[in-house]
């Protein structure tokens, strides 16, 4: 479709799948991540397959990084029409054991990244009649021990999505996806009992694949969802629909 699509946290997992899915349909992908080297690998793979992509180091919590990326993209004539906020940070600990610096960093990356993206590119999104898609989580709806800052940030993303959709209407549509248990490296440290519980919690009885989130993100950024804005769409295999485990 030849739109410029900026994705944060796109070097791995769901973000990388989102980058590949946009590229596969002909969009020009700006692959950004804290890990610039892995982002370059994603962009290289996209180009090798005939797609269009560049890689950029971007810490979503850094105002200076957003300014530098904005100058680079505008200078190159590649202002983003679509922004996907996917980067996150988490420290697993109950509130009374959570260091204030970890609380602050989790909120600043996970929720603050959404704020900074729109602050930086509201004008290019508006000019392009573009879209923002924010990757939240079922943690916005459901409590888990040990995830206070992450849950607060993800719940904040849902509220901020609604707010931004009102603020920048009618030119920019803003929506969120709420993934459930998706098979990425985020699950590497979870034992088999934890993984079995995650499978049981989803009524579909399995983990989701990053591509199954990516296809919904691409839908929410495209023509097929032209009358959808301010929505928070669960992509969770039914996890948030039941209390049966
Ligand atoms: N995997 C799941 O089960 C699951 C469930 C619900 C929601 N999510 C959400 O999906 C998104 C992607 O998660 P994933 O599972 O693919 O994780 P992942 O660890 O595979 O990828 C996350 C990426 O974010 C990057 N990142 C971390 N801090 C950053 C920063 N400050 N600035 C820029 N990039 C940064 C990392 O380098 C990494 O490449 C996150 O928002 C996560 O909260 C994942």
Image: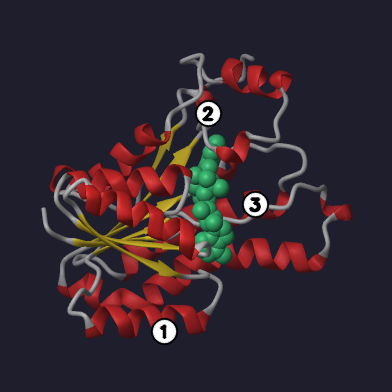
Q: Which residue is mark 3?
A: 150
Instruction: Identify the mark at residue 32; answer none if there is no mark.
Output: none
Q: Residue at x 52, y 70 (%)?
A: 59
Bin the neighbour count of mark 2 within 10 Å (Cα to Cα): few under 14, some 14-19, many 20 and up: some
Confirm or reject: label 2 Cβ below 8 Å from ligand 1: no
Q: Residue at x 53, y 20 (%)?
A: 202
SS at mark 2 in the image: helix
Determine whether label 2 and label 3 are within 8 Å by CB.
Answer: no
Q: How is the image coloured?
A: secondary structure
Choose mark 1 or mark 2, whichever is in front. Answer: 1
The CA distance from mark 1 to mark 2 is 38 Å
SS at mark 1 in the image: helix
Instruction: Identify the mark at residue 67; answer none if there is no mark.
Output: 1
The CA distance from mark 1 to mark 3 is 26 Å
Q: Position of residue 99 (x, y in %)?
A: 83, 62
Q: Residue furthest left?
A: 1
Confirm or reject: label 1 Cβ below 8 Å from ligand 1: no
Q: Is residue 111 visible?
A: no
Q: Residue at x 32, y 56 (%)?
A: 43
Instruction: Identify the mark at residue 240; answer none if there is no mark.
Output: 2
Considering only order in the chain, which callout, 3 or 2, is on the residue closer to the N terminus?
3
In the image, is 41 to the left or to the right of 130? right
Q: Position of residue 72 (x, y in %)?
A: 31, 82
Q: Residue furthest front?
A: 48
Residue placed most toward the observer, 45 or 58 = 45
Q: Residue furthest right?
A: 96
């Amino acid at each position: 479709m030849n739109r410029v699509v900026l994705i944060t946290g796109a070097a791995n997992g769901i973000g990388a799948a989102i980058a590949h899915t946009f590229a596969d349909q002909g969009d020009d992908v700006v692959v950004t991540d804290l890990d610039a080297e892995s982002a370059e690998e994603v962009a290289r793979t996209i180009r090798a397959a005939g797609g269009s992509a560049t890689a950029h180091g971007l810490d979503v919590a850094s105002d200076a990084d957003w300014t530098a990326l904005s100058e680079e993209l505008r200078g190159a004539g590649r202002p983003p029409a679509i922004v996907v906020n996917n980067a996150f940070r988490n420290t697993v600990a109950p509130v009374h054991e959570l260091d204030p610096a970890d609380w602050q960093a989790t909120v600043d990356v996970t929720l603050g990244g959404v704020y900074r993206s729109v602050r930086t590119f509201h004008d290019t999104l508006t000019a392009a009649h573009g879209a923002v898609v924010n990757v939240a989580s079922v943690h916005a709806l459901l409590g888990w021990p040990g995830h206070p800052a992450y849950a607060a940030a993800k719940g904040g993303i849902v509220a901020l999505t609604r707010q931004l959709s009102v603020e920048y209407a009618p030119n920019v549509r803003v929506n969120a996806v709420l993934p459930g248990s998706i098979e990425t490296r985020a699950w590497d440290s979870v034992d088999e009992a934890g993984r079995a519980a995650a499978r049981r919690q989803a009524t579909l009885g399995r983990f989701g694949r990053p591509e199954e989130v990516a296809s919904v993100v691409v839908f929410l950024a495209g023509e097929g969802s032209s009358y959808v804005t301010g929505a928070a769409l669960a992509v969770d295999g039914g996890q948030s629909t039941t209390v049966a485990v």
